[in-house]
Amino acid sequence: MKFRSVPPTTFTLALLAALLIAACNGSKPSYQAPSYRVKIAAVQRCAPIEEADFSGVVKEAQSVNMAFKVGGAIMRILVSEGQQVRKGQLVAEMDPRDYALQLAATQAEYDKAMDEINRVKALYERQSVAEADYQKAVAGELLIGAKLKHANDQMADTKLYAPFDGYIQRINYRPGELVGVGMPVASLINVEYYQVSIEVPATLFAQRSRIERTTCTPSIGNSDPIDLEPIGHNVVANSNRLYPMTFRLNPRANRQLAPGMEVNVRVAYRPEADQRTSIPADALFYADGQSYVWQFNPADSTITRLAVTPDKPTSEGQIIITEGLTGDEQIVTAGVHSLSNGLKVLPIPPKSATNIGGLL
């Protein structure tokens, strides 16, 4: 039997026709092209700053009552109220005559005792005196030495010096007046920096580590908020069940401030365990009395409708969401009213910084 050869072009056409018929009779391909191009954005976790206002009073950083360590008559006061003084500056002097006499007598007693003590030591080195007499001489040296030091200290204590830089706030005595040990002669305040104290409730005190910023504004005049630096707090509540907190204030931030002035203190903090999120306002839509967003599923490029609970808008055009989102979702942010559940979409890539106008 002989076979008639078929031209290659005829065979190819026949094969294509057979494949086309099989395709028409078979099932449709499983791939479905995306129907919509949509804008996608990530949900943002938000912990908005909360603010609380308190009343505070400006205080000096440090205040001390300066007093003599010895008693007697004041001889001189070398400062005046309101005067600025430096650390170590002489403030007042006491009449030193009684203490000078005491020092002179003690010095003479010391010199006489040391002559005898040195003689006993010399004899002890030559083994000409008993051990007990030597130990007695050593103890006597310590005793007379301490007595002389005490007399010198009392003489030095007839002068009163400023313990730090500051201002003389008040002078309580005048020259010629008698004062006892520890009686405050003058008060000195340190205004190198100010302090501001407030009392906060337990709810805020428990979140003190989450405080972002603390500022104060004087109650008089117009002033921008002044930053405060926390320096301490009391871990025990007072009788009002409030917790005192103390802040440092730089006096140079506002020259009008002075100790005793009232200020408004504002504490800005992030609430603990805040699970709220924020989304663009255009991503939210309503149906059947419920608020929704479209969640984008990257695995299959489909969208799913999610019920959410909106709160309030922000100044940046966002909507705060209190329930329904965790912050890990991607959502559709435009054209949300023309979409349907399970629809396959194609995300629009973000514009490149180098593609100005989105022309490419």
Image: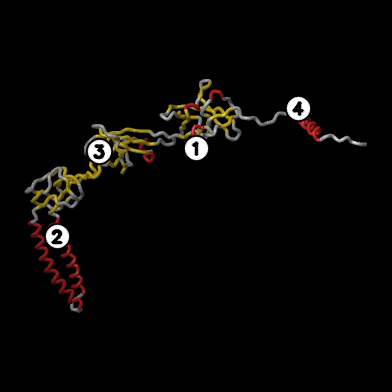
Quadrant where the C terminus sits is top right
Q: Is residue 36 left or right of residue 74?
A: right
Q: What residue did someone put label 2 on? A: 152
Helix, strand or loop at disc 3? Answer: loop
Q: Whole-Å distance between the Cαs marked 1 and 2?
A: 83 Å
Left or right of 112 in this view: 238: right
Residue assigned mark 4: 25
Q: Position of residue 202 (x, y in %)?
A: 35, 36
Mark toward the viewer: 1 or 2: 1
Residue at 15%, 58% (x, y): give it: 153
Return the residue at label 3. Answer: 254
Per the image, label 4 sits on a secondary structure element best described as: helix
Would you identify the image quadrant in which residue 272 lies?
top left
Residue sitting nearer the eye, 41 or 72: 41
**In front: 300, or 23?**
23
Residue placed at 18% from the left, 78% from the top? 128
Determine whether the residue tagged by mark 1 lies in a helix, strand or loop: loop
Q: Are marks 3 and 4 in contact (CB under 8 Å)?
A: no
Label 1 sits on residue: 354
First in sequence, mark 1 or 2: give its number. Answer: 2
- Name the residue nearer the viewer: 357 or 238: 357
